[in-house]
Image (cartoon, rainbow, N blue to C red):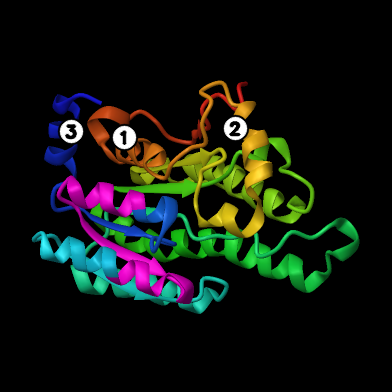
Amino acid sequence: MSEQNFDLFRAELSGKVVLVTGGGSGIGAAIAEAFWRQGARVAIHYHHSDKQDISALAQRICAAGGEALSLQADFGSSPEVTATVAKAIAHFGRLDILVNNAGSMIARRTLEEVDDDFIEQVFALNARSVVTACRAALPIFTLQGAGCIINVSSISARTGGSPGSSIYSASKAFVSTLTRSLARELAERNIRVNAISPGTIDTAFHELFSNREKLEKTRVGIPLQRLGEPNDCAGTALYLACPSLSGYVTGQVIEINGGQLMA
């Protein structure tokens, strides 16, 4: 990306307030840091497992003269989602960009192993939390006359994922469809809604739910011959948040997968 484009990002994003959910590590942390580097003020949500990572990230941002707020919450709980958005707005006095990245597969389970409680857990975290966060941000976006929502879907929303990930994949398909629906509904309020859809990104997610043999098999089938890195997703998030570059883009799900999926 050219230095000219980074100058444009800085000009348009400096001083903006961004809330990144699930921002303690991986894709979320890369997106939060990318926004900070362009002058944005960042609220970073995390859950218990990311406490050490989020502390290091927030300290690095503040030490460099940036503004960062860390917010711990269980996004499987709607009241905690609503409270997190409210805390970010109360701290910074506004909210310009909402990045809905929080999510997890929870576990790999075959159809025989899937029960109602498991479905509820996966959909509460990956699907319902997105609806709740968007709903909580809507009043401030409406008051300000503009807003930007960037959801994080997954390549598995299109492919169905690998064995044991059916419920997770379905929850991400929900996110992709919700993105398109909200883009139509909120356009009249000058709120743009888009999503990024990462392919196989080499993060702690795959340390939990994959293995190196499986990842290597995936890698050799990717045209660019490598797994993705968290920073591969950050540039697209910046683009979607920058009105002069993407002001006519809404309702889109942008695939970021090295050619792993082409359609």
Q: Residue at x 54, y 64 (%)?
A: 129
Q: Is residue 141 left or right of residue 122?
A: left
First-in-chain label (1 vs 2): 2
Q: Amino acid at mark 1?
A: Tyr
Q: Nearer the viewer, mark 1 or mark 2?
A: 2
Q: Is residue 61 left or right of residue 99?
A: left
Quadrant of the drawing holding the N terminus: top left
Residue 36 in the image: state x and y as whole percent: 21, 52
Q: Say whether disc 3 or disc 1 marks the residue closer to the N-terminus.
A: 3
CA separation in Å, label 1 and label 2: 26 Å
Q: Quadrant of residue 44?
A: bottom left
Q: Which residues are magenta?
A: 30-55
Q: Is residue 211 above or below residue 75?
A: above
The answer to which image quadrant residue 77 occupies is bottom right
The alpha-carbon separation of the residues under discs 3 and 1 comes to: 10 Å
In the image, is residue 22 part of the stretch drawn in magenta?
Answer: no
Residue receiving disc 3: 6
Mark 1 lies on residue: 239
Q: Is residue 5 above or below residue 46?
A: above
Residue 135 coordinates in the image, percent (x, y):
46, 62
Is any part of residue 197 visible from this angle? yes
The circle on residue 219 is: 2
